[in-house]
Each structure stands twice: as structure tokens, then as C-alpha cells.
Image (cartoon, grey):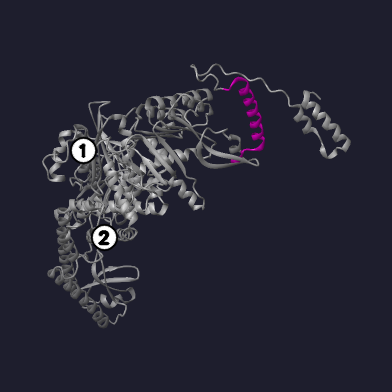
Amino acid sequence: MDQPTTQAPAAAMTPMMAQYFALKAEAEDCLLFYRMGDFFELFFDDAKAAAATLDIALTSRGEHGGEPIPMCGVPAHSAEMYLARLIRAGHRVAIAEQTETPAQAKARGSKALVGRAIVRYVTAGTLTEDALLDSRSDNILAAIAQVGGAGGVIGVAAADISTGRFETLAIAESLLPAELARLRPSETIHAVGLGPVNGVAIDGAHLFENHAFDSNRVEQFLDRCWGVATLDGFGQFSRAERAAMAGLLSYLDHAGKGRLPFLTPPVQRSAGTHLSIDSATRESLEIVQTMTGQRSGSLLGAIDRTVTGAGARLLGADLSAPLLDQGEIDGRLDLVHFLHDASGQRSHLRGALRSMPDIGRALGRVVMGRGSPRDLGQLRDGLTGARLLRERLGDLGDKPTLLTNLLPALDGHGQLVDHLTRALVPSPPTEASSGGYIADGYDAALDELRAMAGDGRRAIAALEARYREQTGITALKIRHNGVLGYHVEVPARSADTLMKEGSGFTHRQSLAGVVRFNSVDLHEQASRVAQAGAHALAAEAAHLEEMIAAVVAHKSAISRAAQALARLDVSSALAERAAEGGWSRPQFEDGQCLDIVGGRHPVVEDALAKDSEAFVANDCRLVGDDRLWLVTGPNMGGKSTFLRQNALIIILAQAGSYVPAASARLSLVDRLFSRVGASDNLARGRSTFMVEMVETAAILAQATERSFVILDEVGRGTSTYDGLALAWAVVEAVHETNRCRCLFATHYHELTRLAEKLDALSLHHVSAREWKGDLVLLHEVVPGPADRSYGLAVARLAGLPSAVLARAKDVLSRLEAGKAKTGGIAAGLDDLPLFAAAIQADPPEADLLRETLTALDVDALSPRDALDQLYRLKQIAADGQA
């Protein structure tokens, strides 16, 4: 937000305004939360923006340049709630805290202003607090760097600072949108020089200093992050990756004001380590969220049976990046298989995991300096639970390899757990400022201080009873607040007794209805309580720092334990889902194979189950020379569902999950493409048809023999002739050039002629029947072409007016009559050019027989008249004349 365009001369500014403007200049385009006692206050344009977003009152305070200063504020104790709303609205916030107490400021001079400094920047990608995060979703910050100018190599560094996840990759510019779609970053940064990618701006990205993306700059962070002097021990990172890492770490250093979060050593990925899925395909398949951004209704929502937030986050990451390493896939499947068959062990494991806290995010807060006693308690409890799981699972015989590899990470924290167990109370508080989190018996000196404070409070209680007896005021109370400390409070009507000279009480404050006093005895007792309490708080704070230091020293081992627990949760959840739905283990083999028996769409099946309806399973066998299916049939018959379910089965299988099918044999898919549906992209000037063609062009340019492609209604966004021509050519290209496995759904029945000349293409259709004028959709995929499209029957189901349907039927009969005479628009498709000029069909002759029958009033006919009319109708049928 911009600060005021006109500022008063520095000499005319109040000290507070001078301090504010200095901090605002440092905050730049962030909203400045300026701490004023118990409130964070915002001024000028920041106040206007915040008030509009938060729906709070916009007021004013003082003047600047002769104009009132717009102001709004939020309570410091509930600031997180307001921060969450601001971040979700796209704002970034700079937190300016008081760095000294009013007493400390006064010691510098009677008119000294309390010191303030920006202690942290709060942005979408740098959150760690539970209240600001979705426990079941990653929160990724991504940095993008480009080496070699436009069209050069792109480096991407991505981190979730709430858990320490950190990865890098170097890719061609054309692959960046797909990788960003996989990561789904909450915040993206890049250098000033990086413009649009493939002509499209990077959604939600903002600029950061160019010098931060210097590939050599990463060296200065290595010791602070991982205690190393070189990256070589973690992998051979390209210049682009190093530049992206430097930009990301510089941004985190800036946001944390010199305090870096916990990050695991960078994991180097490449485009060839996981199934490539572009952004359009992810959107159409609704893998981790629906097109409206909801988790419910997506593939993830349909299969997620995880019982921890960490497990849910890992499952989402698995589905976003299915594997290409068959050994790693089989390792995951072996563990799912083991837990699927061992239902008792699975039930115990899920029960144990359900009670465990999210130690990964607790660790992230502790390392960032935002940890609380409660976070330490969560680490204690989580690591204790991990050890118990290690003991139980370690005793099992014939364990899968992945489980054997995970178990060591669950143990080895005994010394730290013992320290935290002895030091902390069973349920530590979230706030450390009030103390009370160190257990009795841990520190004898602390116990003594607490006893002294307790004795002092008991002495104050006894003093209250003595004062009541001495003054005769039964309503007299000794109270405490943050301004006066301990004081005597009496009703106003009884105050005269204490006001008398020699009463031993000193007047402090008069309020409506009560008067407050102090006394020498109370002051002495209060001083002893305050002194003991302050020393106790200091002792607890020292112990808190010791525990935090111990946790930070073990951060890598704790992170590995958190990751192991998340993997166990995912595996047991997938086993639970498989057992619940009767899913089967996919089998992988070499070659070009996709053989699914009884496949089902997990999301649609769930939706039908809620209405007690059964899903109709279908087979899909793309094996050997039969690798391209042309699927026809009526709308609503299930073509799109059939296409999508096979794509989702591939994603599940390569993510290491059982699949919703009676059986599934498949070979690894390197790239998955879906051209299913489209909508106008008016913001980028693209129509439905343009979006369709862009997506189809990407498929034809990138699909390999190992890819799987689903294409639905290609060409429908333009005229019949253009659309059919394009669909025809696309089918030929997929068959002859890409040679990938493909399901192609269409309403262009003329395309079925391609089966005569394309050897690897076979015809299939979703079956339907008309019964007594009604359309019955069977949702079965069977061999052969559809006999017709049933478009009018579907329109009737949709509720089109009968007059419109009657007119459509008449038009259809005329078109079909023309087709019978000319061979239809498919005539001549075997020879190029595909089409000659459209042939205008002659108008059909009048149907005299129908008109005569329609004109008859049957109820008014005598037997003789009826016989005459029958002879007349017979004559019309014979020669067409009355």
C-alpha cells in the first residue's frame, strides 16, 4: 500500500509519525501492523484496505498535512484471526512490535518514544501458525529463476516451511505451468526479469530483488541451514536450481528478519521422476480439488481415509506426482498390501496415529522461534507414540521392505523425550508469558520460588481478612490488575473510613461505585509475590529456551520421524479404502498395456452410493495393436465418466494405491493428457474453441508412445464441417504419429469410417435403449458403433418443450432424407479434400396419408363412413393421390 503522497516536513511530524513512516518505508507494499499497547493499528491507505477486507470500522486519529489520518486497529490477542483473512484476500503484512517496555523507554528520557521494529513479514507462503494454515494441505512457497534469457532453462525451488519440505528442479520453460500446477504454491516469487511464460503471466506471482537470484548467493545460506559448506553432498544442482534456491532462501531470510526456518536438505527432482500431468488435465480430472477449488468431490476427497494432517498432505502430494519408478511404486504397493491383509494391525496402527499430534508442523514453529510450550508437549507426545509404534511393528515377521526402512526413524529420541517428559506439565499451555508449563519437581529452585509466591498470595488473603475485621467493611477486597498491581477495593459508600488520616491506607483511584487504596503491609507482601513470580517466570523461560535448543539440535531426526508417520498413515489409509471398496492391486508389466476389468470411477461411485445406486463397471483393454478406442453413444450415457475413470486408475496405480477395478494390468505411463470439456477464458481472450485447440495442440506435440490420452468431443466448438474435419485429422495423428494409448469420445458418427483404414483403432459405444418412448441409459461400454446419438431423447429427458422437440424431429427427418440421397456429410471422406461444398437437400413432399389420417374425426364416423375412409386411405397409400 502506498503511504501518503504528501508528507509534512520532518520537523513538523510527531515522533510517532516519524517512526511510523520509517517502518512503512521498510515494509514497502505490505500492510503495516503497528503495535500500540494491546492493539495493532494501521494508518492511511493500509487502514482503508484493511478495514474494507476485514469489515471493521475505519476511523481517524490526529492529522497529517492538515488532513485527518485514516486509522483502524485489531486486538493483539486475536491478531491471528485477522491476519488469516488478510492473507486469504491476497495481502502481505509486516508486523511492527514494541521492542522495549514503556519503562525502558522512559529510562532513555522522559519523552522518549517506545522503540518499535518490524519483526516479521507474514505472507501466504511463510505461515507456520495452526490458525493460519489448513492442517490437511501443504503450504508451498515457490521461487522461479531463469538462466539464459527467454526460452532458457527454468529453475524452481519449492518449500513448505511449516514442515521443512524442500525440493528443486530444472525444466524447460514449456513445462513450468505443469510443475506449478503440481506444486499448487500459495505464494510464488521471481526476479524482475522473468516475464510471462509461453505468453501467459504466472498466476499470483510477485517480484523480489534481482540480486537475490544470484546462483552464487546460495553459498551464504548453506551453513545456516544445514551446517555444510557445499551443496555437493546433496546432489549436482544446475545453475538455474541454485539461482532459484538463492531467491527462495533470501526471501525467507527477509521475511523472518534474519531467522531462517527449518528446511530439510533439498531434494532434487526432474521432470522424468514422476508422471507428467499438465494444468488443464489436472483441472479436468479434479485430482486434488474440484474446478471450484473444493477438496470434496475430487479424487483426493473420494479416497482420503488418512487420520492425520501430515498423512493427508502426503497423500495429496502422492496423487499430484505419481511415480515413474516401478521399484518405488511396488514398494508402496507392498506396504498397502501388507496392511490390507492384516486388518487387525491396520486398525491398531490407525488408532495410534489418530491420537498423535502433528509433530512436523510443531517442529517448524519451534525452529522458527514461534514455538510454544504446547508445541514442545506435542513433540514429546508424538515421539513417545512413534516409539511405541516402533516396538509393536518391529515385532512383526515378514515385513515389507518399505516398513522395515521406515521403522528406524520412529525411534532414537529417548533422551529428548525423557527431557521433555520431566520438564513439562502433562498439558502445556499455548502461551508462555504466564508460566505454569514447567512440571513440579523438575527444578527445586523454581519450586521454591513458586512456594514463596504461593505463601505471599496466602498472606495477602489473610491480610484481606484482617483488613475487613479492622475496618468493619465486609465488602472490602484485595484485587489485582496490570496497572495498580495489588490494591484494596471498597464500595464508594464505605470509602470515608479509609480516607481518614492515620487509617494506614493511601488513596489510589476513584471509580463509579468503588474506591481503591494501597497500604504499607499490602505493598510489602505484593512486592514479595511479584519478585518471586518474576523470578519464577524467568526460570521457566530459561528452561523453555533449553528445551527449544534441544529440539533444534534433533530437528533432522524429528523430521524423519514425522515423514515416516505420514507414510504409515497414507499406506494404512489406502489399505482401508481398498478394503472398504473392494479395490484390487494393480499389476505392472513391460510394453504398451492398459487392461482394466470392471473399472469404476471412485468419485461417481461414491456419489451414487449415497443415493443407494450401483455404479456400472466397465472394462478397458488397450493392449497390443488395439490401442485407440473410438467411443460413441448418447449424451449422459457415461462416455466422459468412462474416459476419466481410466485416467484416474492410472494415477492411483502409479501413486502406489490399489485401484477401483476387479483387476488392472498396465505398463507405466510417462504423460497423461485429458481434453475433456472447456470453458471460455475471457481474461486471456480465448473462446471455448480456442482453449480446446490449444489443449489438443499440446497433446499432439507432447504425447509419446508411453502416454495415455483421453479426448472428448474434439471439434464440437465450431461448425459441423470444420469440427468433423479437425476430429478426423486428430484421430489420424494420434494413431499414426503419437501412437499412444487413447480413448476418443465423439458424436461425429462419421468418424467410425476410420476403423476401415486405421488398424489400431476399434469402435465402442455406451449402450442405451428406448422403451415406450423413454430413453434408458445402460452406462455399459460395448464393442461396435452406436446406432444413433439419441439426442432428441436426451433433450426430452432434459425437459425441452414438446413444441421444440416436435420441430427438431421434423428438421431431423428432413436432414436424414437429404443424407439418404447424397451419402451425407461423410461421403467422400476417404479421399482428400475431405469435403466438397455442402449439398442442399430437396424439400420433402407433403405427406398426404398422414394429413388425411390427422383430419379424421374417428368418433363421428358411422360404420359405412369408416369403410369409405379405409378405401380412400388405401388408394392414397397406393398412388399418393386422394
Screen quadrant of the C terminus: top right
- Around disc 2, counting alpha carbons within 10 Å, would you say few (fewer than 14), some (14 to 19), or many (20 or more)? some
**Left or right: 249 in relation to 489:** left
Q: Main secondary structure of the magenta part?
A: helix
Screen quadrant of the N terminus: top left
Q: Tell me where the magenta segment starts and ends, as one range.
A: 796-824
Residue 354: percent from left, percent from top: 32, 59
**Which amino acid does the dot numbered 2 rest on?**
Thr
Residue 128: percent from left, percent from top: 27, 50
Which residue lies under the disc numbered 2?
430
Q: Is residue 806 magenta?
A: yes
SS category of the residue bearing label 2: loop
Would you identify the image quadrant in which residue 434 lies? bottom left
**Which amino acid does the dot numbered 1 rest on?**
Met
Q: Nearer the viewer, mark 1 or mark 2?
A: 1
Residue 245 - label: 1
Residue 768: percent from left, percent from top: 56, 39
Q: Is residue 840 magenta?
A: no
SS category of the residue bearing label 1: helix
Residue 108 shows in the view: yes
Q: Is residue 430 above or below residue 286?
A: below
**Left or right: 574 in relation to 112:** right
Most foreground residue, 648 or 168:
648
**Left or right: 512 in relation to 120:** right
